[in-house]
């Protein structure tokens, strides 16, 4: 059984003390595919080192995270464009809009989001979307950029069933992680109404650890708790969930 973690920040400082042991724990549990999103240029070398250390398991993305869209965002976007031109990446991400931390940068965030969507189209890559308190704004941009070559993953999906269906309508899979195990997560109340062909697994580690680890550091091995919850909700075996969601990830990332 091969399990795919479609979103894990393995380069995070949270893993500096035990990164190799943490990755080994995940591999030993059957997680064989780790898709690693970018944040900004300061993390690029750490990401490339991960790929050198674990070439059989690590698949990198490139992009500028919306919470890191600051006054120097054009320089950061140039870095994204340069890296896409000279290194193999499997998605443009994570990109999008975040209005939880800072609403003052909305215009910059929208510009950066659109720019990176166009880079994804140019390089024939999927996008991986970060959305926090910004569904309307994200959907507005996706509507503007709608095209057959726009596709990807709505990472850490936490919206309503109506928003889920709208996201799927933009050729997006839904990234389901630890939130589905939360008592107040809400998505567990309807996710089984979404055909599982639209679902991929993720941890977003070191963030959003599933129960019973909620509030602690998350790691890719904990994707098992997400797998078990979806098995319960869809009334399918964990092996079936792993197989289907890995197949879905292959449709998006092309590998």
Image (tube, rainbow, N blue to C red):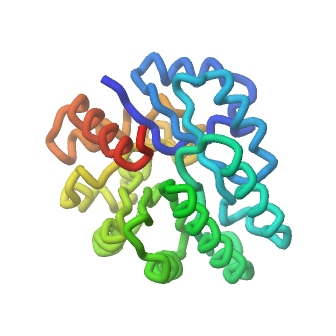
28 relative position to 37: left or right: left
Q: Position of residue 181 (x, y in %)?
A: 37, 47
Q: Position of residue 183 (x, y in %)?
A: 36, 54
Residue 122 higher or lower than 232, as above or below: below
Q: Position of residue 42 (x, y in %)?
A: 81, 48
Identify the residue shown where x is 68% and y is 25%: 52
112 relative position to 6: left or right: right
| Quarter the N terminus occupies | top left
Q: Is residue 216 visible?
A: no
Question: For this rendering, which residue is in front, 5 or 205?
Answer: 5
Q: Is residue 105 visible?
A: yes
Quadrant housing residue 118: bottom right
Identify the residue shown where x is 30% and y is 34%: 242
Q: Position of residue 176 (x, y in %)?
A: 39, 51
63 relative position to 127: left or right: right
Residue 217 higher or lower than 160, as above or below: above
Identify the residue shown where x is 48% and y is 20%: 27
| Quarter the C terminus occupies | top left
């Amino acid at each position: 059984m091969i399990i795919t973690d479609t979103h894990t920040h393995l380069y995070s400082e949270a893993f500096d003390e035990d990164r190799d042991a943490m990755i080994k724990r995940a591999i030993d549990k059957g997680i064989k595919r780790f898709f690693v999103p970018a944040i900004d240029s300061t993390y690029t070398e750490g990401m490339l080192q991960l790929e050198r250390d674990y070439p059989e398991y690590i698949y990198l993305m490139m992009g500028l995270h919306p919470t890191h869209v600051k006054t120097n965002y054009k320089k950061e976007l140039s870095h994204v464009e340069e890296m896409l031109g000279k290194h193999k990446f499997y998605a443009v991400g994570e990109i999008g809009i975040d209005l939880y931390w800072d609403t003052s940068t909305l215009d910059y965030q929208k510009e950066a989001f659109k720019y990176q969507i166009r880079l994804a189209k140019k390089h024939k890559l999927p996008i991986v979307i970060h959305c926090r308190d910004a569904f309307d704004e994200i959907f507005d941009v996706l509507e503007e950029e709608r095209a057959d070559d726009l596709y990807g993953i709505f990472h850490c999906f936490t919206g309503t069933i109506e928003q889920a269906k709208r996201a799927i309508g933009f050729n997006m899979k839904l990234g389901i992680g630890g939130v589905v195990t939360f008592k107040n997560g809400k998505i567990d109340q309807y996710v089984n109404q979404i055909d599982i062909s639209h679902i991929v697994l993720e941890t977003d580690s070191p963030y959003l650890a599933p129960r019973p680890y909620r509030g602690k550091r998350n790691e890719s091995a904990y994707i098992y708790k997400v797998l078990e919850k979806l098995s319960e909700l869809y009334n399918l075996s964990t092996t079936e969930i792993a197989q289907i969601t890995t197949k879905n990830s292959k449709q998006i990332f092309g590998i």
